[in-house]
Amino acid sequence: MATEIVTRWFLEMTAPEQLAPAPAPDPELAVTRAEIPSPELSRFLYEAVGGPWYWLDRRDWDRARWLQELERCETWIASLRGTPAGYAELAPNGTTVELTYFGLLGDFIGRGIGPRLLHAAVRRAWELGPARVTVNTCSLDGPAALRTYERAGFSVAGRREERVVLPDAPPGAW
């Protein structure tokens, strides 16, 4: 275990007009809602996407806890030619919709999928009628994460440095 200083950025949009224009469509990419809560699917996506980036907070959840969380969220999956490439999780909470999880499986990073999935997810978040849409990222996430959120129209609303204890290596997708 190692202790690291991690920078966390809290980002928000306060009006739908702040969402950047949609990237050009990719005819091989589909973004669809997983309408039936599936703890197994969501756990797979969480570990496959977040494993390289030290996503640890849900790794010890049991099936009941996953199901409880999924019943309050929307899960959106990006698929390239039928293969899951990434996901976004939206959690409405009062006047805010939080983009709680967002990312791509490693083989799909750098193909332009992230901005397309992000645009679709944020557009859907605004359809839910919030006063603001939020997301956070940190220095452990992918190197393009903060830049991708800002290009989509999010603004940094806050920043915090935290001391965190991490395993010697990220858990990985496997």
Image: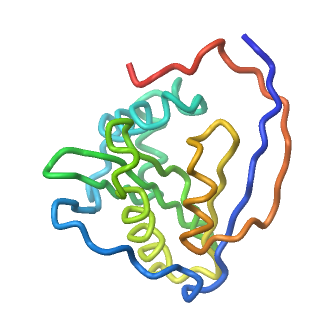
Up/down of 110 relative to 20, above or below:
above
Question: Residue visible at 73% across and 58% down?
Answer: 10
Question: Residue visible at 45% across and 47% down?
Answer: 103
Up/down of 147 relative to 1, above or below:
below
Quadrant location of the N terminus in the rendered image: top right
Q: Which of the pair 72/169 is nearer the observer?
A: 169
- The total of numbered circles placed on residues is 0
Question: Residue visible at 27% across and 59% down?
Answer: 35
Quadrant location of the C terminus in the rendered image: top left
Question: In which quadrant of the rendered view does residue 55 lie?
Answer: top right
Residue 95 visible to an observer of this rendering = no
The x, y position of residue 91, in whole percent, is 52, 60
Question: Residue visible at 16% across and 67% down?
Answer: 27
Structure colour scheme: rainbow
Q: Quick check: 6 left or right of 110?
A: right
Q: Which of the pair 11/33 is nearer the observer?
A: 11
The x, y position of residue 118, in whole percent, is 45, 64
Question: In which quadrant of the rendered view does residue 34 lie?
Answer: bottom left
In the image as oriented, which residue stretches furthest toward the bottom? 17
Residue 130 visible to an observer of this rendering = yes
Up/down of 36 relative to 31, above or below:
above
Q: Quick check: 130 left or right of 5?
A: left
Q: Quick check: 29 left or right of 86?
A: left
